[in-house]
Amino acid sequence: MKIGIVCYPTFGGSGVVATELGMALAQKGHHVHFITYKQPVRLDFISNDIHFHEVFVEEYPLFHFQPYELALSSKIVEVVQQYNLEILHVHYAIPHAYAAYMAKQMLREKGIDIKVVTTLHGTDITLVGSHPNYKSAVEFSINNSDVVTTVSDSLRKDTLRLFSIRKEIKVIHNFIDFEKYPEISNPECQRHNIANEDERIITHISNMRPVKRVSDVLAIFYKIQQKIPSKLLLIGDGPDREFLEEEVKKLEIKDKVLFLGNSHEVNKLLCYSDLFLLPSDTESFGLAALEAMAARTPVISTNSGGLPEVNVHGVTGFLSNVGDVDDMAKNGIYILEDTDRLQQFKQHALEQAKQFGLQNILPAYKEVYREVIKGCC
Ligand code: GMT
C-alpha cells in the first residue's frame, strides 16, 4: 500500500506512535510518506520505502499567524498526486484532520479519491480540541474522516461525550516494537554510572507540561527517598522544567535528581529503571508508561483516562487518584522495599507490555487500511 502519514515530528507521544507505525509498515514493504514540517525525531530507519516531505511556511509581513494548515494541505495534494498515495493517515486532529479534509476536497476536483484515516491521541480531544475555539472544526473533521480511531477506549468515550460524532470510532491501542527493547539485559546499561549499588532508580518521562503534574513526581520521590535510597531520572523537557529545577534545590535533593533532557533513545535510558512515575491529570493512554513496562519497569500512575487500560493495579504497578501523592509514594515504597517483590512486578510489567507488542497491533491498522481502500466506510 502507498500511505501518507501526517504527524507532529517532535517528542510528543502522537508523533512517536505515527513514526513507529510508518517504520513498521515500511519494513513490511509498504511505501510510506511522512508529511510534516521537520523530520520526525524517532525516524531512525532508512529505507527506499520511507520518504519525508517537508512542509514549508513562507514568512510574510502580513501574517501574524503562519498559515500552516494551508501549506500542509497543499503539500498533501502534491504528494498524493506525485506518488499515487491511496491512504492518508493523520495523527492528532488539530490541525491535521482539518488539513486532510481540505486536501481530500481539492483532490476530488482532480478526480482523485484519497481515503483519510484519523487517529485521535488525547489532548487533541480532551484539552485542546474541545475548547470552543476549535470544537466546530475538530468535530467537522472527525465526522468527515473516512475512518476514525482512538488510542484507548477511554479516549473513544471522551470523544463521544465531548463532540457530536456520527461515525463509528475504532479503538486501536498504542504499541511497542520489542526489537528495540531487548529482553536480555542491555550490555551498555551500566547502572553504577547513575546510582550506587544500594540505590533504586526511579524515572519519569514527559514533555513537562502542567497536565503531567511533574511537581507530584518530585513530591512522590521526596517521600520515597526518605525510606529507600534512590535516584530520580527526569527525561524530557518543557515549560515546567525551570520550576522543577528550583524545587529540587529547595527540597535539597539536587544530588539525587538528574535532568536528562529530551532523548531519542528512551529505550536505552529505561534499562536503568526500577520504578516509573506518571501522576498525570489525564492520559488518553500513557505511551511513556508502556515504554517503561517494556523495559521491565513497574508503574505508579493515576487512575485517570486510559491509564487503567495499560497499568494493572496491584500487578504491573498501582493506580491512585489524581494528586494523592501519599498513596503513590506508599505504593512505590511497597514495590521497591523488597527485591523479590520488585522482580515480580518487573516481570508482570513486561508480560503486560507484550500484549501491546507491534505484532498484535499492526494488523489492526492494516485491516483498517484494507477495508477503507475497498470502500467499506
Ligand atoms: O502527552 C502529551 O502531552 C503528548 C500527547 C501527544 O499527542 O503527543 O500525548 C497523547 O498521545 C499519546 C500517544 O497516543 C498518549 O500516550 C498520551 O497519553 C496522550 N497524552 C494525553 O492524553 C495527555
Image (cartoon, rainbow, N blue to C red):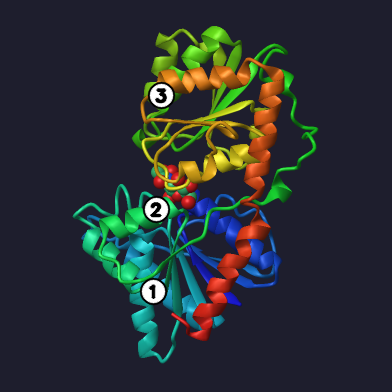
Pinpoint residue 145: horizontal percent, then vertical percent.
38, 73
Q: Answer yes or no: is residue 139 visible.
A: yes
Residue at point 36%, 49% (across, down): 123
Q: Amino acid at mark 3?
A: Asp
Residue on which disc 3 sits: 216
Mark 3 lies on a secondary structure that is: helix
Q: Which is more foreground, mark 2 or mark 3?
A: 2
Task: Tell me if label 1 and label 3 are in contact, CB under 8 Å.
Answer: no
Q: Tag 2, which secondary structure?
A: helix
- Which of discs 2 and 1 lies nearer the camera? The answer is 2
Residue 258, above or below 79:
above
Residue 114 image offset from top left, x and y in percent: 45, 81
* Mark nearer the N terminus (1 vs 3): 1
- Distance CA(mark 1)–CA(mark 3): 43 Å
Of residues 51 and 205, the one drawn nearer to the viewer in this rendering: 205
Q: Which residue is mark 2?
A: 155
Residue contact at pointers 2 and 3, CB within 8 angstroms:
no
Question: What amino acid type is highlighted by mark number 1?
Answer: Ser
Q: Which mark is residue 74?
A: 1
SS of the residue under disc 1: helix
Q: Residue extending furthest front? A: 314
Q: Residue furthest bottom?
A: 111
Mark-to-mark CA distance, 2 and 3 = 24 Å
